[in-house]
Image: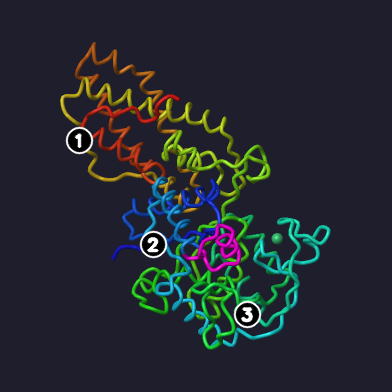
Amino acid sequence: MKKTFYLTTPIFYPNAKLHLGHAYTMTLADALARSHRLREENVYFLAGSDENTQKMVDAAAKAGTEPIAFLDGIVQNFMKLYSSLNISYDQFIRTTDTRVHWPGAQALWEKIVAAGDLYKKEYRGLYCVGHEAFITEKELVDGKCLDHGTVPEELSEENYFFRLSKYAGALRQKIESDELRIVPQSRKNEILSFIDSGLEDVSFSRPRRANWPKGLGVPVPGDDSQIMYVWCDALANYITALGFGRDDALFQEFWPANVHVIGKDILRFHAAIWPAMLLSAELPLPESIFVHGFITSGGRKMSKTLGNIIDPEELIETYGAEAIRYFLLRHISPFEDGEITREGFKDAYTANLTNGLGNLVARVMKLAETHLPKPVERPKAEHFPQEYWDALNGYEINRAVDMVWSRIQRLDERITNEEPFTLVKKDAERGRALIGELVIELYWVGRLLNPFMPNTSATIKKAVLENKKPENLFPRL
Ligand SMILES: [Zn+2]
């Protein structure tokens, strides 16, 4: 039987356009998914959107649209971006999907109830709509939320609470021992010290307010006055997508997840609340959580106010999706914050794609087309260096891409040193043999590029197998 590989991405809020940070998360995940398909594993890749939220209700109201219709439009845009970036997801889950998502979220809730881990109590606090959460006095400046500039509402309400505190010891042990592997180590340390600072029980529901739109919010089983709040709704998507609580064939096949790909801002939810919920429900924990940093521009986190937002659509239009994927995967460290500017992007494009890979493909295939009577024989066995897989298994995706560029450089150097175009004129047989070797080397470059730049990879393979120079891959701008 084929090895399975299940990876998930965060479900983003469809209250605004996706920015380059979202594109980054999806591209990292896609590279991993493709790298496991390259190993001939049975891969399941989940994407989705988190829709039952106050932010969303507000955004729809502002747009003067019914929430579900509003959501449909934005989700279409998500899918359009994913499609232009060539994100090869298998399912897009929406948490307003009453057929796919709700039964599983409710089944999970009931398991947590059965474990005695949900209780009702009064909650009092300052609620910030922008945060979609209660905030503390410390987060206020002049009575307004520091991040959103709005005055929070004072709320007192009955909520169900989840006994997160009960699982502190078990979580610590699972994470410390790497039974639940948090990558990179710095994020593992961060979550361990968060656990050590003391875990408090968390609110799992909200009263259903009179003006709350129909069709949004998973009803709490057995209590019509409440709807689920974030955790048991949003995080549950990772199992409801597989049919948990509904039809569990996929769940049996793919759970536990091999990796949840997330950004550093949602580490606590994924590495504390979510595994605690799974422990409570007696379900297996995911194998690993890969935590990436943020993309910055001009040294600052992208924001509307700073005017340094880079729209992925704009980059795709100018450079093409393959170039965006290349830049994000190679020039941004997957574990730290990474810088992108329009100038930096353009320089990398020209140096490494136009003059680098694009030029190499053109030179080698021009030689092949001119001097080889027929295509080279395709290598029989796949051969990928172990260090390439090691880098990918450690989520050091940039290191894996670097390895491909070292080969590109070596191939360039070989052409410079061995001058195949001169040799083939002096000694046709030896010249052809050398060109054949270069073409095979180019074939491997193409194969190794498969997870990162799938279209370029396919173009190179086709060019080699047809012995034909392809169209200019990365035109000079
Ligand atoms: Zn706020």
Name the mark on residue 91. 2
Residue at horizontal 60 percent and vertical 67 percent from the top: 54
Residue lying farthest to the right in this orientation: 142
Mark 2, other Cα within 10 Å: few <14 / some 14–19 / many ≥20: some
Q: Position of residue 287 (x, y in %)?
A: 49, 65
In the rendered image, which quarter contains the N terminus?
Answer: bottom left
Local secondary structure at mark 2: strand
Name the mark on residue 377. 1
Q: Position of residue 236 (x, y in %)?
A: 50, 72
Mark 1, other Cα within 10 Å: few <14 / some 14–19 / many ≥20: few
Which portion, as a residue range, is magenta?
50-68
- Mark 2 vs 3: CB contact within 8 A: no
Residue 330 visible: yes
Occupied quadrant, residue 139? bottom right
- Compared across the picture, whether 14 is left or right of 38 comes to right
Q: Amino acid at mark 1?
A: Glu
Q: Amino acid at mark 3?
A: Pro
Please tell me whether residue 63 belongs to the stretch shown in magenta: yes
Mark 3, other Cα within 10 Å: few <14 / some 14–19 / many ≥20: some
Q: Position of residue 333 (x, y in %)?
A: 56, 44
- Compared across the picture, whether 43 is left or right of 166 comes to left
Q: Give whichever of discs 2 and 1 has the lower sequence position.
A: 2
> In the rendered image of this protein, does residue 298 appear above or below residue 359?
below
**Between marks 2 and 1, how big is the CA–CA gap?**
38 Å
> In the rendered image of this protein, does residue 313 appear above or below residue 278?
above
> In the rendered image of this protein, does residue 243 appear above or below residue 416?
below
**Between marks 3 and 1, how big is the CA–CA gap?**
68 Å
Q: Which residue is mark 3?
A: 207
Q: Amino acid at mark 2?
A: Gln
